[in-house]
Image: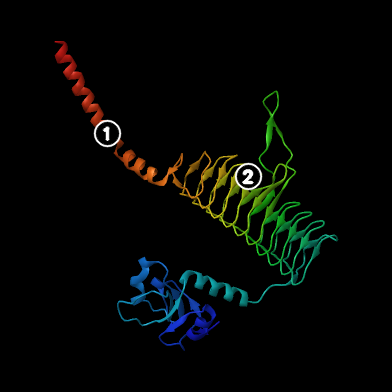
Amino acid sequence: MEISAKNLAELLNGTVEGNDEVTVHDVSKIDQGKPGTLSFLANPQYTKYIYTTEAAIVLVSKDFKAEKDLSCTLIRVENPYHSLATLLDFYQQSKPQKTGIEQPSYVSSSASYGENVYLGAFSYLGQNVKLGDNVKIYPHAYIGDNVEIKDNSIIYSGAKIYEACKVGANCIIHSGAVIGADGFGFAPDDNGDFKKIPQIGNVILKDNVEIGANTAIDRASMGSTIVGEGTKIDNLVQIAHNVELGTSNVIVSQVGIAGSTKIGDHNMFGGQVGISGHLKIGNQVQIGAQSGIMNNIEDGSKIMGSPALEIKSFFRSNAIFRKLPDLYKEIGSLSKRVQTLQESVEE
């Protein structure tokens, strides 16, 4: 699709600086800009590339000030990164949309679905499944009995949604994700053997949730495991039974959250964070990558490390840790000097 700077600016509520008739047909990174493409400048570290980029149009913030001559046309917007996301979404929506039921696929006679639904080949819809309008189920996806999926949600190839789980509107579940597998519940008997505890709850994904590839969200032992509205979960994340996530959380790859932990709103967890069970984590918490969380976390905390510390304390401690080999040698040297002094006094 080809579009002019003038039309882009109208779409983004921006202003053109340069040739408003120049057109683009693709996007590129600003440091790898090519003729006929649209790029953007959001990170100040990449400012130097705007003077050499071959991209035809660059999205910049309204307060950007050029220090050299530019060969590209600028479109000034409030937030270049968000504007690019808007454009990419517009492009995605303009592509032909899949509809209809491909064969072979299985649809239970008690299943129901709304308008413009797409069911890919080899997909499975169990008993009493309810799909809203514009839902897309890609090939080899499994939708178990009594599952509900609301309008405009997308379930990609190979995803599995176990029985009685609920998926909100505008959700995306990527390939290999498993929603609603049994929680990890076992009770030791008198012989020390483990007996499985039936997991009779479900998983509820609220509206606008995205689940990454090969992520697993376990069903509750009783009640529901809940992922709040607008939460975005990366690939390879494990969320255990009865966890409750609030709204607009961002959880990066390989995070593990143990059972019954309650998490508030607008939190950000870096990659490979591990969170123990039965904890309470507040709102607007930021946890650095590879941190281990073993205690409740208050609102607004920024923490890192394992066990996790307040981030300033973590960096101070880390600075001391790096000096430990030298301190060890120094203590050894002082110990020898003290011993020598003691021996001379005793003589």
Mark 2: which secondary structure? loop
User: Does 108 sit left or right of 242 as displayed?
Assistant: right
Q: Amino acid at mark 1?
A: Leu
Q: Earlier in the sequence, mark 2 or mark 1?
A: 2
Residue 292 drawn at (x, y percent): 49, 42
User: In the structure shown, which secondary structural element does the residue marked by tag 1 occupy?
Assistant: helix
State the residue position of label 2.
240
Report the side of 198 relative to 275 (left or right). Answer: right
Vertical relation: 29 (above or below) 272: below
State yes or no: discs 2 and 1 in contact (Cβ < 8 Å): no
The image's colouring method is: rainbow
Locate the C terminus by quadrant: top left
In percent of width and height, residue 26 lies at 50, 78
Q: Work out which residue is located at the far top of the displayed protein and give it.
A: 347
> x, y percentage for residue 278?
60, 39
Numbered circle sitting on residue 327? 1
